[in-house]
Image (cartoon, rainbow, N blue to C red):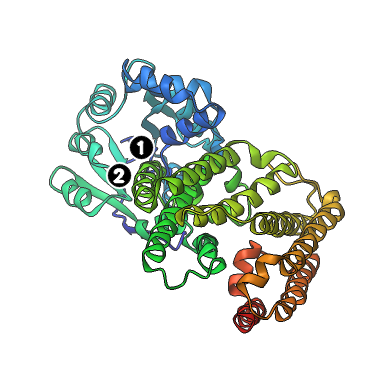
Amino acid sequence: MDRDLALESTPGDPGKTVPLCVDLDGTLLNTDTLVETAVLLLKSNPLYVFAMVFWLFSGKANLKDQIASRTHLSVDSLPFNQPLLDWLCSQREVGRELVLVTASNFRIAEAVSDHLNLFSDVIASSSVRNLSAGNKRGELIARFGKGGYDYIGNSRDDLEVWAACRNAVVVNASPAVARSVAPVATIEASFSRHRNVASEMLRAMRPHQWTKNLLVFVSIFDAQGYADLPLLIATIIAFVAFCLCSSSVYLINDLLDLESDRGHKEKCNRPFASGGAPVVLGVCTIPVLLIIAVLLAWAAGTSFLGVLVVYFLITLSYSLYLKSLVLLDVLVLAGLYTLRLIAGAAVAGAVPSVWMVSFSMFIFASLAMVKRYAELKALEKDAGAWTSGRGYHVSDLPIIAQLGTASGYISVLVLALYINSREVTTLYGDQQTMWFLCPLLMYWIGRIWLIAGRGQLNQDPVMFAARDRTSYLIFGLGVLTTLVAL
């Protein structure tokens, strides 16, 4: 039994002759199939959003039918409520008839039923009738009579159905719904799933990735504008806007990758893939984050707002399509890092130097490639051949290593040329001391590729550096070198 769910009460024989009717979304499944299929459809073509609005004018049943007819949901990977499923199997073993009764479209309901091979009948929404609340109650009374069935549900819409049943089984219900069931029905059993939705949503937003957005502060340090308080405040606002915008894209990415994440040994534990966070809440959170990000970006300056919009459009394109294109994906990732630097310059109303842009493109291309290299190295250990949705093969490891290390050391060359430029002589009093930055960077790049080659890099290289003591030491020496050179 799943440690996060528990059967709270199970009385005696519930009566073998009374059918046990089971709801699907939020009850048998820890997800919402309508939202998942809608996301699948939008993933195939975002313009379907306009068609969905048109279909909804003809009723929710029509909307569900149109979406279900155009998508294929992999039911075998869906997050089933395993403790409830185990209990249903035990009920069937003692002779109870199980009926799947759901407001989901009949195509999805029948696919789930065929997969589980547990239900004797399926009652679901058609193209003209949405089987929820009162409609579901009326259908069950017509088939089994009032009080002639037991019902398993989870939401406030199910209260009408419970009011006409013999016994109720309450699953994953909110405290308010759970309190409302007792006055209208005899509770036979109750399943609760102990989860912190707020915590799961925060995890889905990936706050640990926000450290990448600290790049917007680079322009302040590059121009030595530490004492400019208005600029510092504007940059902090820009940083927060970038964090919220990037989190909205992470939510979009996880919703689009639900199916592939569920087939991954680690990503299957992500909040939406595992059912820890409701997919509908993810869909609703995305526009909220974007609206707040835009308002903050506007406060930071229209130039910054323009860069943020470009960042969002590129990351959205990456999630929808570009990440499947070999090599172009790492170049896009490197470009996104560089956009953060450009965003910082935009806050200050400045144009980033050619040195900064060229250095960032090479160094971040190397980091993007080392991330792909680490993923392929892990796949090699598991005797795999290629990364699903990425287009890379294990046989690509040598060429990726060559391209990545070359790109990393070209960034050292760019740094050396910058140190020898006129810009450095005007900003720093001791140009010779700045040369110490080159061996520091050479060591760090070589070390991270060596770690990746040994199969010990199990995460994003930026996140690795954020937890690596040696990286902190190298960074500290770099800062000290810069201060001494002033």
Does any portion of residue 140 appear in the rendered image? yes
Q: Which of the pair 367/393 is nearer the observer?
A: 367
Image location (x, y in percent) of residue 285: 37, 46
Question: In the rendered structure, which amino acid carries the disc numbered 2?
Answer: Asn
Image location (x, y in percent) of residue 134: 22, 27
Image location (x, y in percent) of residue 237: 38, 59
Q: Secondary structure at mark 2?
A: loop
Disc 1 from disc 2: Cα separation? 8 Å
Image location (x, y in percent) of residue 413: 79, 64
Q: Which of the pair 37/12 is nearer the observer?
A: 37
Determine which of the numbered discs, if any, sits on residue 23 in the image.
1
Figure quadrant of residue 203: bottom left
Locate residue 16 relative to residue 3 in the image: left or right. left
Tag 1–tag 2 contact (CB < 8 Å): yes
Question: In the picture shown, does residue 61 fall above or below 440?
Answer: above
Q: Which residue is mark 2?
A: 154
Locate residue 62 relative to residue 117 in the image: left or right. left
Q: Which of the pair 274/122 is nearer the observer?
A: 274
Q: Secondary structure at mark 1?
A: loop
Q: Residues within 10 Å of mark 2 (few under 14, many from 20)?
A: many
The residue under the point 64% across, 79% down is 429
The residue under the point 63% across, 76% down is 428
Question: In the rendered structure, which amino acid carries the disc numbered 1?
Answer: Asp
The residue under the point 71% across, 75% down is 437
